[in-house]
Structure formats: structure tokens, C-alpha cells
């Protein structure tokens, strides 16, 4: 790919996202990228409210419900009423979900190695750091709005 200095980071991220989405098939990962992201979030945060999951994944509330319906019917997550507030649901990952996440992350690592193969370990670490920083900045901006 020819380098064009006028192409901004948003367009480059969009191109990279399209490449990742095209290659990250359920056949490869055993699940969709959104399901993988959900299970990964639950691993990192253990039990979360459905609202916190929606915000953490940056997805629409209705889509989160549909996503959780699919994951729950597959036995990968469970929802239960929050005893402190019966209007809320607490979401957690099942043991079957942990196994599915482990398998998907192994496939994801292979895919990352292919897609980010031109970057060395330090560059990958820097990229991950910068992306986290940008996402956290958006979360902070949204909270202050």
C-alpha cells in the first residue's frame, strides 16, 4: 500500500477495521467479534450490569439485549436480577463462556499476527496503548457531557 500522508488516522482505522471484520469470521473464531468483545469485557470486569456492559462495549442498548440473548442461549453468559435493584440485570460469563473465549482468543492471536505482521512487538504495544488512550478519552468526554 502506498503511503499517503493526507490520509488521517480515522480513515486508516476504518480500513484496518474493515480488514479485521472481513477476516474475523465466526468459522475462524467460533463466534462473532462482538461476542468475543463481550466475553472479553466480562472476563476483565467479572460481573457487570447490563447498562455498564452496553457502555463498555460502546453499543446500543437494544443490540446489547439481542447479543446477550444469543450468548445466553448458547450457555456462554448468564443474566440475573440485581438483588439491590430488581430493575437491573447483572451479567456474568459461564465456565463454558470462559472456554469459548480462550479458544477464540487463540484464533484471534493468529489473526493479529497476520494482520499486524509488519509491526514489531514494541510497535504493537504502542498501537494498543494509543488505541486504549483514545477510547478512554472518549469515555471521559462522554461522562463529562
Image: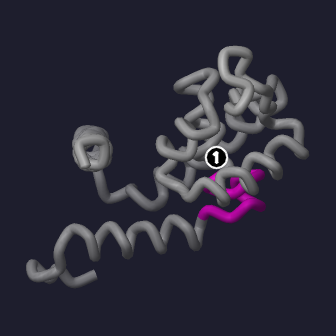
> Is 28 above or below relative to 84?
below
> Is 23 above or below relative to 78?
below
Res. 62 image quadrant: bottom right
Q: Which residue is mark 1?
A: 36
In the rendering, at what x and y percent does residue 30 appear?
77, 51
**65 with respect to 110 (left or right):** right
**15 with respect to 112 (left or right):** left
In the rendering, at what x and y percent does residue 142 appear?
30, 48
Q: Nearer the viewer, residue 139 or 143?
A: 143
Res. 8 image quadrant: bottom left
- The colour scheme used here is one colour
- Farthest-out residue, left: 5
Magenta residues, as a range? 24-34
Q: In the image, is residue 29 part of the stretch drawn in magenta?
A: yes
Q: Nearer the viewer, residue 75 or 143?
A: 143
Q: In the image, is residue 12 part of the stretch drawn in magenta?
A: no
At 21% from the left and 68% from the top, the residue drawn is 9
Amino acid at each position: 500500500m502506498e503511503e499517503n500522508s493526507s490520509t488521517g488516522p480515522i480513515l486508516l482505522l476504518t480500513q484496518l477495521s474493515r480488514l479485521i471484520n472481513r477476516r474475523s469470521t465466526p468459522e475462524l473464531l467460533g463466534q462473532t467479534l462482538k461476542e468475543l468483545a463481550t466475553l472479553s469485557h466480562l472476563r476483565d470486569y467479572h460481573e457487570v450490569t447490563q447498562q455498564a456492559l452496553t457502555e463498555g462495549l460502546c453499543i446500543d442498548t437494544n443490540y446489547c439485549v439481542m447479543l446477550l440473548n444469543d450468548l445466553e442461549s448458547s450457555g456462554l453468559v448468564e443474566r440475573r436480577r440485581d438483588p439491590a435493584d430488581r430493575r437491573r440485570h447483572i451479567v456474568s460469563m459461564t465456565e463454558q463462556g470462559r472456554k469459548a473465549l480462550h479458544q477464540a482468543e487463540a484464533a484471534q492471536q493468529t489473526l493479529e499476527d497476520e494482520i499486524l505482521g509488519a509491526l514489531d512487538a514494541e510497535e504493537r504495544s504502542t498501537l494498543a496503548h494509543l488505541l486504549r488512550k483514545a477510547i478512554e478519552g472518549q469515555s471521559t468526554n462522554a461522562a463529562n457531557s
